[in-house]
Image (cartoon, rainbow, N blue to C red):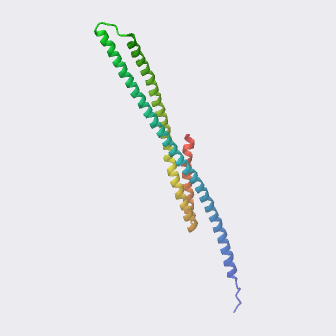
Amino acid sequence: MPEETEIDTDALRERIDEQREKRGGSFLRWISLTTALLAALAAIASLKAGATVNEALVLKTDATRLQAQASDQWTYYQAKGIKGAVTQSAINTWEAIGKSAPPRLAAESARYLAQQDSISRKATELEHQRDEKSHEAEVLLSQHQIYAPAVALLQIAIALGAIAALTGSRFVWFGSMGLGLVAAILLAIPALHG
């Protein structure tokens, strides 16, 4: 019987396992790197989402304060109008009995009318400021509506990265990176419009 050549399969198996570990280790490093980048991006997105909603709330509060001030001015305007009407009524009463009204009544009536004009301008300016603050808040809230889904996508991408590391699935890892890319694009939208 011919002598068979003996192949050292143990050494071959060890070399195959080493190569598998090297490739798997490299794959895991890539997953770790991309997942860390996604986590950093998620932290930035979360901060942006929180900052935009907080700033929007401050602006909405300012708008509410300005609205209250404008309402106070319009109430003051009406009070001056009532005082002016009462003064004009007194003038009309003097004239109805055929006498001249005291000059101070005409001066008061003119003063109330001038004050109403000034108060009206101030109330209108406060309403304009209110509208500006409200508009700024709406812009920030629309940005928040972009940041919030980006945060969610990044969280899902990070979870998929963990699944890819556990299962060794490149397909899942590509899905993780794809979601991360979509989230990064979403995060860029407010910057491009700002």
Residue drawn at (71%, 90%), measured in percent from left and top? 3
Q: Quick one: which residue is furthest to the left in this view?
A: 97
| Residue 81 image position (x, y, % from top left) | 37, 22
**How many numbered circles are shown?**
0
- Residue 78 horizontal side relative to residue 163, left or right: left
Residue drawn at (57%, 43%), measured in percent from left and top? 191
180, above or below 118, in the image: below
| Residue 180 image position (x, y, % from top left) | 56, 55
Residue drawn at (62%, 62%), measured in percent from left and top? 32
69, above or below 118, in the image: below
Quarter of the image with the N terminus in it: bottom right
Q: Quick one: which residue is furthest to the bottom in this view?
A: 1
Front residue of this view, candidates 163 and 92 = 92
Quarter of the image with the C terminus in it: top right
Front residue of this view, candidates 144 and 179 = 144
Residue drawn at (47%, 28%), measured in percent from left and top? 125
Front residue of this view, candidates 33 and 44 = 44
| Residue 54 image position (x, y, % from top left) | 51, 45
Residue 38, located in which quarter of the rendered image?
Answer: bottom right
